[in-house]
Amino acid sequence: MEFDLGVILSLSTGRCLTNPTAIREASDYIYSEYYNSFLGVEQTEQLTSQYILNLYPQLQGIGEFEEFKTWEDVNQFIDAQKLIYGNKLIIKPMTEEISFELTSQICGKAK
């Protein structure tokens, strides 16, 4: 399924860069096949971010550190990124195997 780049960047950075409802819909879609209910909110955000960045490694750091004063600044930033990466990107639901693999990576970094 295709999602707006603003949604993708919101998921990869953990920042709200677009409509929160659209972010939630994309998150629900990602976890539609498998959701590890033992993870807390922070771990789920890390898992989602890592999943997106595994699919699109070129997005690493994009939108993560930029400072925005207004929503207009955010929209201009997203529009500029769309010229580089396209309006929408495809995401598939996360499988149980991918979830376990990424969770292991995240937990390994926390040590």
Image (cartoon, helix red, strand yellow):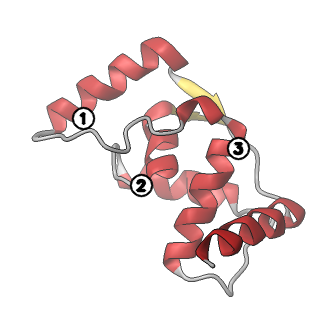
User: Along the line of sight, which residue is nearer the eye, 40 or 58?
Assistant: 58
The residue located at (17%, 31%) in the rendering is 73
What amino acid is labelled 2 in the image? Thr
* Quadrant housing residue 49: bottom right
Real-space Cα separation, disc 2 to disc 3, in angstroms: 24 Å
Across and down, in percent, residue 34 comes to 79, 69
Across and down, in percent, residue 94 comes to 77, 57
Q: Horizontally, is 13 left or right of 55 in the view?
A: left
The residue located at (58%, 70%) in the rendering is 44
Q: Horizontally, is 68 left or right of 98 in the view?
A: left
Asked if labels 3 and 2 touch by Cβ distance under 8 angstroms, the answer is no
Real-space Cα separation, disc 1 to disc 2, in angstroms: 17 Å
As helix, strand or loop, the secondary structure at mark 2 comes to helix
As helix, strand or loop, the secondary structure at mark 3 comes to helix
Residue at numbered disc 2: 21
The N terminus lies in quadrant: top right
Query: Which of the two discs, 2 and 3, labels the residue nearer the N terminus?
Result: 2
User: Along the line of sight, which residue is nearer the eye, 109 or 55?
Assistant: 109
Residue at numbered disc 1: 74
User: Along the line of sight, which residue is nearer the eye, 74 or 103?
Assistant: 103
| As drawn, 58 above or below 68 | above
Tag nearer the camera, 1 or 2 = 1
Tag nearer the camera, 2 or 3 = 3
As helix, strand or loop, the secondary structure at mark 1 comes to helix
